[in-house]
Image (cartoon, rainbow, N blue to C red):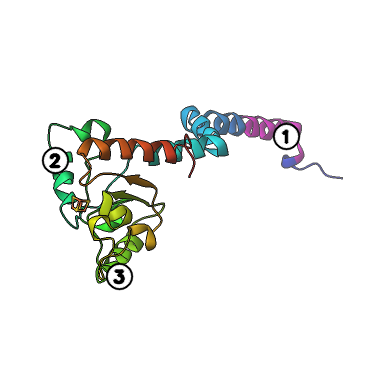
Amino acid sequence: MVETDHDSKEFVNARHEMDALVAASMKKYEAKPNVAFSKLSELVKSMSLSKKLVGWSRKNSLWPLQFGLACCAIELMDFGAARIDAERKGYLLFRPTPRQCDVMLVAGWVTKSMVPEIKRLYEQMSEPRYVIAFGECATCGGPWWESYNIIRGIDQVLPVDVYVAGCPPRPENLFAALMKLQDKIGGKIED
Ligand code: SF4
């Protein structure tokens, strides 16, 4: 059998040498995973931690819907003033569009003709969404509880998370109600 150049010992050695060089070069330029990101993705994969992170962000970014129904809404305005300084807890990001909100503050009496509109606003809000019944009228109809055109509390039509008593309640009560809602979202208190 005739030995060709390709079978010669020198050629085989050179080929092995070239393969080794290519392998070493590939290894040198191999993209290493970013340590910080790989660790972060491992952490995020852990269900309990990601749940906690989502819960923490949800709890600390309550965005109320900007609307008022009756005299209690005046207290909402006071809530937004410097005396209460609600911004220190991040409660003042009132949004005019329901799609950017997750907290509905029902401040005032609810007439039967307003019910479909309020329900529509609630359904347009992002989930999970929360409702605070602010004042006697929103809680049970208040002074108008026997009226022919006012419902006896917003909980007749929407699920309420926190009730605030008073006619009208003080803005400080709203501050406390939002803190209670945060406790509820954080799992500190139950329904
Ligand atoms: S609870 Fe009192 S202050 Fe508030 S809307 Fe009703 S009547 Fe007005």
Circles 3 and 2, Cβ within 8 Å, touching? The answer is no
Q: Residue 37, position in %: x, y?
A: 47, 33
Residue visible at 26% across and 55% down in the picture = 142
Q: Closer to the observer: label 1 or label 3?
A: 3
Circle 2 is placed at which residue position?
A: 78
Specify start and end residues of the magenta stretch as a single range. Answer: 7-20
Q: Secondary structure at mark 1?
A: helix
The tag earlier along the polypeptide, 3 or 2, is 2
10 in the magenta segment: yes
Circle 1 is placed at which residue position?
A: 12
Q: Is residue 106 left or right of residue 53?
A: left
- What's the amino acid at mark 2? Asp
Q: CA distance from mark 1 to mark 3?
A: 85 Å
The tag earlier along the polypeptide, 1 or 3, is 1
Residue visible at 29% across and 62% down in the picture = 121
Q: CA distance from mark 2 to mark 1?
A: 88 Å
- What's the amino acid at mark 1? Val
Residue 116, label in figure: 3
Q: Is residue 127 left or right of residue 93?
A: right
Residue 106 can be seen in this image? no
Q: Residue 102, position in %: x, y?
A: 33, 50
| Residue 121 to residue 15: above or below | below
How many marks do you count on the picture?
Answer: 3
